[in-house]
Image (cartoon, helix red, strand yellow):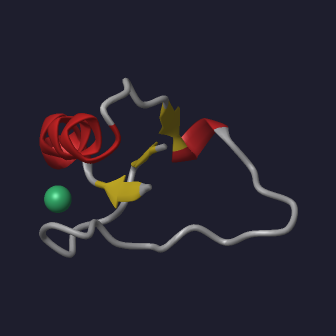
């Protein structure tokens, strides 16, 4: 799973496919609330505000 800003979604998808050999789901953090989990606030690539989960 990768948490990324919108600039790094494509890179995260590429990594996911390389690692898991399967297409990920993209989750928009703005439109999703997690009842028992707080997603990281920042992109793993650049430290900007996280906007998407690639899972
Ligand atoms: Zn980023």
Please give the count of numbered marks on the rendered protein: 0
- Where residue 50 appears, x then y in whole percent? 36, 60
User: Quadrant location of the N terminus?
Assistant: bottom left
Q: Is residue 48 left or right of residue 23?
A: left
Residue sitting at the far top: 23
Q: Is residue 47 above or below residue 4?
A: below
Q: Quadrant of residue 9?
A: top left
Q: Is residue 13 above or below residue 29?
A: above
Q: Is residue 5 above or below residue 41?
A: above
- Where residue 24 appears, x then y in whole percent? 42, 31
Could you tell me which residue is drawn at 56 percent across and 44 percent down? 30
- Where residue 26 appears, x then y in whole percent? 45, 31
Q: Quadrant of residue 38?
A: bottom right
- Where residue 22 appears, x then y in whole percent? 37, 27
Q: Is residue 10 left or right of residue 17?
A: left
Residue sitting at the far right: 35
Could you tell me which residue is drawn at 30 percent across and 32 percent down? 21
Q: Quadrant of residue 23?
A: top left
Q: Is residue 33 left or right of residue 52?
A: right
Q: Which residue is nearer to you in this view: 46 or 23?
A: 23
Q: Quadrant of ligand 1?
A: bottom left
Q: Which residue is nearer to you in this view: 18 or 7?
A: 18
Could you tell me which residue is drawn at 16 percent across and 34 percent down? 10
């Amino acid at each position: 799973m990768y948490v990324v800003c919108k600039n790094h979604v494509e890179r995260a998808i590429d990594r996911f496919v390389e690692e898991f050999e399967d297409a990920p789901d993209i989750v928009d953090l703005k439109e999703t609330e997690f009842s028992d989990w707080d997603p990281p606030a920042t992109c793993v690539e650049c430290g900007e505000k996280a906007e998407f989960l690639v899972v």
